[in-house]
Image (cartoon, rainbow, N blue to C red):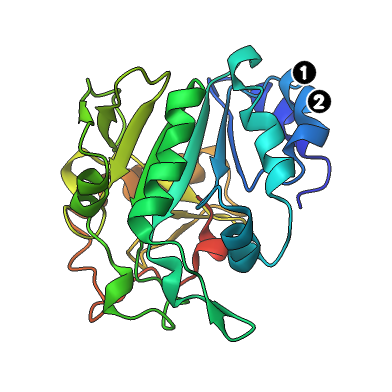
Amino acid sequence: ARKSCPQLVKMLKNIPGIEKVTLTTNGVQLDQYLDQLLDAGLDAINVSLDTVDPVLYEKITGRDKLSEVMKVIEKAEDLPVPAKINAVSIDFRQLQTGGKTAGLSPQENWQQVAELAKRYPVDVRFIEMMPMCDSSGFGPEAYIPFTRVLEALPEAVPAAKDGGIAKLFHLPGALGNIGLISPVSAHFCGECNRIRLTADGKVKPCLHSNAEYPLKGLDFDGMKAQLEAAIFGKPQWHGDLDVAHKSGAGRNMNQIGG
């Protein structure tokens, strides 16, 4: 969707102080541009993929493109950079298309997605559904705690932390790990070291806060001061998140990034 994405990666990699550039993508065109992105210096890939069931994938995305996404995942063993899969842990049976609901249970879906970590050297991270501004169509049943995913994977055992925000687990014989990210049921605000820069040039110190620090038009010292204010002003907790307590982000995820 971002024209000249490989060129952007190369420009970012050439900026002094930037050590790592990671791409988060739905993967539909990733195989087509993979060599260009790697040549530009891309360091890691995150693929957003909620299911590996072709019928359910088309119902979720509206497109029959799962095979295109799988091309890169199937190459993971030969990739020179690490790859991760991000999946939202939601019950898609409430999804309706043509008068029919998706029939796959969430447990079956999670088990199928988790199989990717067994077959390929990829980490699969299950992320709890977050009550963003555009999530009004989802009821209380959409907010599934990470413990339900663990119940569907009884053979998973705790793995060593990698410094990130996910609770890591390992499946017997798996090439990758399972990660569980729980912003709703068990927040990790005390360990969060993330800030976000929006496409319109504003820094968000917390995803679920409407506090934003504009950078556009500032000189170096001005931007440094704003970044320091954002980092040191990072809230200790984003507050309750559930169907009754929407995110205070003030924007939808496609307007924020990440």
Describe the element under mark 2 as helix, strand or loop: helix
Residue at point 79%, 23% (across, down): 35
- Of 80 and 41, nearer the camera is 80
Residue 83 position in % (x across, y down) = 54, 27
**Residue 120 rendering spot, x and y as whole percentages:** 52, 23
Left or right of 14, for residue 3: right
Query: Which residue is located at x 55 percent, y 47 percent?
Result: 52
Q: Which amino acid does label 1 sit on?
A: Asp
Q: Do the residues labelled 1 and 2 touch (CB within 8 Å)?
A: yes
Identify residue type, mark 2. Gln
Taking the spot 49% from the left edge, 24% from the top edge, the residue there is: 119
Label 1 Cα neighbours within 10 Å, binned few <14 / some 14-19 / many ≥20: few
Residue for badge 2: 36
Q: Could you tell me which residue is drawn at 22 percent across and 44 percent down?
A: 150
Q: How far apart are marks 1 and 2 (CA)?
A: 5 Å
In the image, taking residue 54 as reference, residue 39 lies left or right, namely right
Which SS class for mark 1? helix
Front position in the image: 108 or 140: 108
